[in-house]
Image: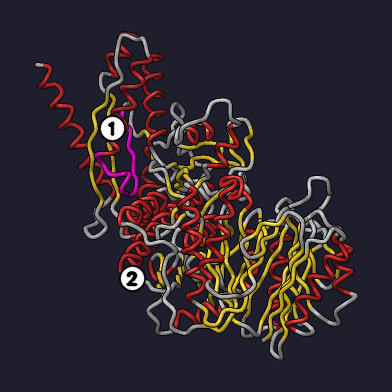
Amino acid sequence: MRVGFGFSTLEDSYSAGLQALKDAVSVSGEPSVIILFSTFNYDPYEIFRSIKENTKDSKLIGGTSSFIIVYDRLISRGISIITLSGEYINAVTFSQDKVLKGSDYTEMGRKVGKLFSKDNPYGGMVIIFFAPELADVPKILYSLYNTMGPKFGYVGGGCVRNPKASFTYTFTEKGVNTGPLALAVISGMEFSTAVGHGFESIKDPLIINKTSKNKIVEIDGIPAVDAYTRRFNLVPNMDLLTQMVFHPLGFPNLSGDYIIRDPIDIDKKAIVFPVEIPEGAVGYVMDGKVDRLIKSTSVITEKALRGITDPSFVLVFDCISRRSLMEDRFVLELKAIKDSIRFDIPITGMLTMGELCCYGDSPMFHNKSTVLVVSGREKTDHPIGDEIEKSDLDILEAELSILHEIASLSSLVSEEDLIESSIEKSVRLFGVRRSAFIRKIGDNYKLLASWGFNRVRDVLKSMSKDTPNKEVFSLGENGEYGVLYIEMNNIDERKRRLFRIFARRLEEIFGLLEANRERKKIERSLRKLALTDDLTKLYNRRGFLLFGEQYLKLSERLKRKAILLYIDVDNLKWINDNLGHSEGDRALIEIASILKKISRKSDILARIGGDEFVLLGLETGESNSSALLRRIRERLEAKDKKRHLPYNLSISMGVAVYDPDNPLSLRSLLEEADKKMYEEKRRKKELKL
């Protein structure tokens, strides 16, 4: 392999392109592949003409920005070119010139992935230049990775558009592209990559409660902007968005690293980000001290070099907002890269708006990060490790955040959304190499969601291999809910423990979803029957006995305990006799309303007598008997404080637990709870005497 490098700062676009090309070709000879970086103040069509007229069948991939990087210099008007030649060097390119919507990006990624995989069966490096305002990068990356898999590397960056121009420009050998992106896969040579940022978390987590597409609407139960800005000291008379950009949001993963997400706009009290952020995610406001950012760049470079011997050139994709943050000291970051390389080889790249690189075992979209790509001969014994050594506190913080997010998984979603969420979280939280969710339908398995897989037979093949770098979880009895497959380098016992917790929580949610489906199925088939109480709109005794029996069967099938609460309204006769039956009805309706609010959709709630209610539900960590009793009493007290009536809402409660290992009938369970309820009522009367 021969590598050529040239750059030019000539004013004329054609002349600058030609000079950079000639300098590079003088070393490499006629190139197989050309990698181009240009500032956006040149005419892209003239640059392309200068290359096309002076090469033969070279493949071309390139992008534009406000600044390019040449060694340790930041150049505001210039062109740099890397040329690669050699018998085995090959490239395939693709450009998308039309803006797509939604699932069209997924289909495009699948199409490109098949094209690249066909021509490069042994892998290669995928380089992506994209227009941040047009391309749905996460969807493209998702479908690319599912089609091409982990034998390929993935790097790239968002091009910067000239404010005076209508388009963001990228290049392939076919011409100048003004659409969402241009891609190339280069094979026949080895690459090593690394990514990082150097930001530190401000040690106070944010819980993302409510989102709308790529907007965070609510954090910690209050408007997103209010919660976000409480985490750092606001500077008077400084634009709020600018201050938030200097303090981006970070989401920790299993290794204690943070994926950065940069605010790009404020919409009333909501915060807009370049990509969607899932509800329930735990994030931290980040702080970027310049010295640490520069230090992290040196560590990133060292990490990229660890995978290569005899390096031949370096590509740099460095976030443009890092320059805004560091100002004049940004050149020290470039110097840190050059000093860490320690070889006299070409170093070039550009400032980007969004970066692509593998984090851990997975390719991901990043903000405010630096990506290094080093080419050379692959080392077979290089260590795998994190960019910066993490403290025990960092690891603990990350683990607690992950556990909170796992516990926050909700049953108020569709099964399809839960399955997709399981894969998204396996990538973002754990940094897995590949993951998949499959389910047996009839005699065959079906691939329902995946990361790094395109066919169910590939998942089954990987599952059958005897390797320590995988975990397989059968969810539900005999895998009735499906099978979760996780593949990752260096799985230790800590990681396995968190994987198990994640899988069991998924199993629990699937059980609740099944309970909902079973209940709705029965409700539809028996809708015409008189199963509800006219006053409270809850099930009546007949409805409870019917659905309750089904619920206990579900408890046995899931091998999960169930809780039965028997509730009696105190002093209802006194209310009816002294204040009238209408007031008694109102008391019953208010208590029914409170019980509805504290119960889950999967629970069975009924009024089975004049002043008697029952609640039947599966026991979970959040729904054990003591927690339910406490929540009911708290709601009653809160309700009484708002009412101005000559009586308080008061109830007596009894609890019975159904153990599937020692089953008993629903009627026996009712009798046990009823007995305990009367014991509480008796104790209340004794206290009054």
Numbered range of the magenta stretch: 612-626
Q: Relative to residue 91, is residue 419 depicted above or below?
A: above
**Rendering quarter of residue 540:** top left
Towards the viewer: 184 or 237:
237
Question: Dot 1: few (<14), some (14–19), or many (≥20) neighbours within 10 Å?
Answer: many
Question: Dot 2: few (<14), some (14–19), or many (≥20) neighbours within 10 Å?
Answer: few
Q: In the displayed structure, does residue 455 sit left or right of residue 209?
A: right
- Disc number placed over residue 143 in the picture, else none: none
Residue under the point 39% across and 59% down: 502
- The answer, for residue 228, to whether it is visible in the render is yes
Q: Relative to residue 3, is residue 641 depicted above or below?
A: above
Towards the viewer: 47 or 58:
47
- The answer, for residue 437, to whether it is visible in the render is no
Looking at the image, what colour scheme do you see? secondary structure
Q: In the displayed structure, does residue 357 sit left or right of residue 535?
A: right
**Residue 613 part of the magenta-drawn span:** yes
Q: In the displayed structure, does residue 625 sit left or right of residue 63?
A: left
Q: Relative to residue 681, is residue 478 depicted above or below?
A: below
Instruction: List x then y, in percent, for residue 373.
Output: 59, 70
**Rendering quarter of residue 32:** bottom right
Instruction: List x then y, in percent, for residue 517.
Output: 49, 52
Q: Nearer the viewer, mark 1 or mark 2?
A: 2
Between marks 1 and 2, how big is the CA–CA gap? 48 Å
Instruction: List x then y, in percent, for residue 371.
Output: 58, 63
Q: Which residue does the numbered mark 2 point to in the structure image? A: 492
**Residue 176 part of the magenta-drawn span:** no
The amino acid type of the residue labelled 2 equals Asp
The amino acid type of the residue labelled 1 equals Ile
Q: Which residue does the numbered mark 1 point to in the structure image? A: 567
Decide which of tag 1 and tag 2 comes sooner along the chain: 2
